[in-house]
Amino acid sequence: MSTNAKLKRGVGVAALVTIALTFWLGLVVTPPAEVMGNLVRMLYIHPPMAWIAYLAYGITTAASLLYLWKRTRRREWDLIAAASAEAGVFFTGLTILTGSIWGRPAWGVWWTWDALLTATAVLFLLYLGYLALRQVPMSETKRGVRSAIAALVAFIDVPIVHESVYWWKTLHQTPSVLNPSMNVEVHGSMAWTLLLGFVAFTLAYVWMVWTRFETSRRQAQLADLEVENAIRERLSAEEVRI
Amino acid sequence: MTLADEEFSEWKTVEGPGRSRAKLIRSLVVLAVIFVALGFVLFKGATNSLEYFLTVQQANAARAKLGNQSFRMEGVVVPGSVDPTPAGVDFTIRFNHSEDRVTEIGNPPQLFQPSIPVVIQGHFQGNVFVSSLIEVKHSSNYVAEHPARIKNAGGTQG
């Protein structure tokens, strides 16, 4: 096994262990919260998933910029952007789902059209659109450039999602961690469990993107090889005929 | 079929870009569905999110203009004002020294309690706000539950 594969496996195992530990601490060890009671246990997974969505779209944007700039244009940047967007859409979906499950008992509704929830739904659809755009048949470079531009446009919504609770009146509360004062509003063992949740889901994201990127790169290399073989075969057939 | 054609047919074919018409149509249909969904979400956002609620103070100031119109109003449930009824619950809501009496039709959410911020949806009917939905607006502060912690500024324990 190569060092790369060992390292990737290590990240995967670490993600599994830390996620299991987050669930154990979140469900068994940490206390119920004032007002929220046991509903607070959703705290250990919902904000980390939202954070991963931000991180994933940030990586997609950075990789897309590197692809758009001709001096750094490489197929790998396009593949990383796509892999990260896939993870981002997955975690945005989970953020909406866990938020809805939390919202029903805490707010009294599964869903409401407040600014944060609406902007999150827009974010989910924008990146779903990005992934759908990548499926449209076109040349590799054209697809890379068009999807990179789409990724940059979609990223505009990320700060809107984060700032929506300050810009508009919302039902959703302000962030407990990533707030302007960087003052963590979660106390004691609950804060440590939340921190572990952030680490656990970040590791899971890294493993997911790494694995997806390698698969996509192999698929692209295989496609190249098939074209080369087909050309070689035709050229040799031509030579035989001549 | 000529001899050359037969020979060509044995050669490998590689799917080129843009060759799959079915894939193109499928992709465009998916994109169109996403665009329609995006349009719907943006429309709902534009009509609901920009002014999600009025505070009790703002609602009272605009009472004549609001009339029987349905809207959302935010405030804090006044302690000692909660009165369960067969239809739901009656309570008083306060924001910045401005108050309104509320009649809620339906079950309040699990976290509904005195001193909690809420957003209620309904309309004014005389001096009462008739609400059909209570949404609890909890804070971003999470503290462990402690049975001995003083809960009210008045000094009651438990």
Image (spheres, rainbow, N blue to C red):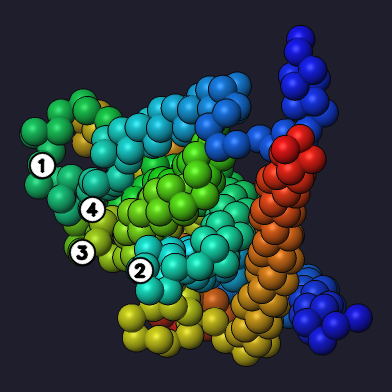
The residue under the point 54% across, 63% down is A75
User: Disc count in the image?
Assistant: 4
| Picture layout, residue A81 above or below residue A137 | below
| Whole-number angstrom distance, CA of label 3 to CA of label 1 | 16 Å
According to the image, label 2 marks what residue? A69
Q: Identify which amino acid the numbered label 4 is placed on.
A: Thr
Which amino acid is tagged 2?
A: Trp
Mark number, residue B62: 1
Label 3 sits on what residue type? Asn
Residues at circles 4 and 2 in contact by the CB criterion of under 8 Å: no
Indicate which disc, 3 or 1, sits on the residue closer to the N terminus: 1
Q: Distance between the Cα atoms at labels 3 and 2? A: 54 Å
Residue B45, given in percent of the width and then of the height, sits at 32, 40
Which tag is nearer the camera, tag 3 or tag 2?
2
Q: Residues within 10 Å of mark 3 (few under 14, many from 20)?
A: few
Which chain is disc 1 placed on? B
| Chain to which mark 2 belongs | A
Q: Is mark 3 on a helix, strand or loop?
A: loop
Q: Which residue lies furthest to the right in this view?
A: A1
Name the residue type under label 1.
Ala
- Residue to which mark 4 is pinned: B55
Say which of marks 2 and 1 sits in front.
2
Residue B97 at x, y percent in the picture: 19, 63
Which residue is label 3 attached to? B96
Work out how far the residue at label 3 is from the one at label 4, CA to CA, in angstroms: 9 Å
**Mark 2 packing: few (<14 Cα in 10 Å), some, or many (20+)?**
few
